[in-house]
Image: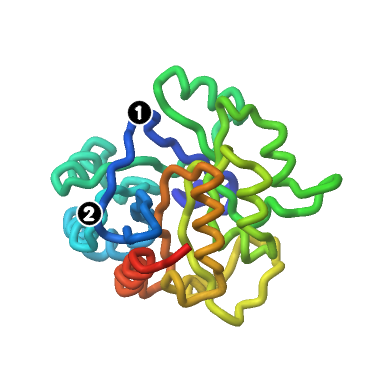
Amino acid sequence: MKQSIRPLGLLAALALATLQAHAADAGLGKNFKGPVGLQLWSLREQFAANGAPATMDTVKKFGIKYAEFAGVFGQTPEKMRALADERGIKLVSGHFHYVTVFNHAGEALAKHGLKFFYHCHGFEFQPHSDGTLMDLIIKETNPKFVRFQMDVLWVVFPGQDPVKLLEKYPGRWELMHLKDLRKGVATGPLTGKTEKVNDVALGTGQMNWPAILAAAKKSGVKWYFIEDESPTSEQQIPQSLKFLESVKF
């Protein structure tokens, strides 16, 4: 397994169990109520080039009040928390390496008021028995201790339907990465890899967001994070927020 902050292998997200959702203005509209935040990996190049304080200033300028981290971008965890606090940004969850068995990890974390999540990345949809490996993971884990984060791009790219998955496993998907796939990109590969330029602003790609967001709300998704891995993420993130403000479902 690669020892990187954003491995292609297994990811887990820790979400603060006691954090309550409060409406933020950016990205919220008549129909989409969020709460919506930003996966900070979207600005990884800005963190490297401009430093953490300046990049967190950019996040604040977007109107973002919640964030999910993937590493601390050269800072200590304490410093990263302080940078967020100073800008009124709550760090809701984070991505870490897989370190142990899901059920056991979830149970251990629950004792500290934390939740264990598995983030899908596309390769879990290999056929298995009468379903996929994703079905196996969900069915073999304890709902009390293991929850899931749906990355919409990494469901659509391997040829799956996010609406059907949300309906099939209500209550299991509590976090969602809002990520759109460029029109014309072929779906079906189970590699968990596509060109970064295939990440486009929400509403300009292949995803049926009204159907997805309606199903997510009904299924029990609690937190939404825009994740944009494209080279133009800084320009696209405001577009995505505007789309969420106006989307109808």
For the residues bearing labels 1 and 2, Cβ distance under 8 angstroms:
no
Depth-wise, is mark 1 or mark 2 nearer the camera? 1
Along the viewing direction, whichever of 2 and 27 lies nearer the viewer: 27
Residue identified by numbered label 2: 52
Residue identified by numbered label 1: 18
SS label for mark 1: loop
The correct choice, above or below, for 49 with respect to 80 in the image is below
SS label for mark 2: helix
Q: Position of residue 132 (x, y in %)?
A: 76, 49
Q: Position of residue 125 (x, y in %)?
A: 71, 54
Q: Position of residue 188 (x, y in %)?
A: 71, 68
Along the viewing direction, whichever of 65 and 70 lies nearer the viewer: 65
Along the viewing direction, whichever of 51 and 19 lies nearer the viewer: 19
Residue visible at 33% across and 40% down? 21
Along the viewing direction, whichever of 51 and 43 lies nearer the viewer: 43
Binning the other alpha carbons within 10 Å of mark 1 as few (below 14), some (14 to 19) or many (20 upward) gives: few
Q: Amino acid at mark 2?
A: Ala
Q: CA distance from mark 1 to mark 2?
A: 27 Å
Q: How is the image coloured?
A: rainbow
Q: Amino acid at mark 1?
A: Thr
Mark carried by residue 139: none
Residue visible at 51% across and 40% down? 12
The correct choice, above or below, for 164 with respect to 229 in the image is above
Q: Is residue 167 left or right of residue 52?
A: right
Q: Quadrant of residue 203?
A: bottom left
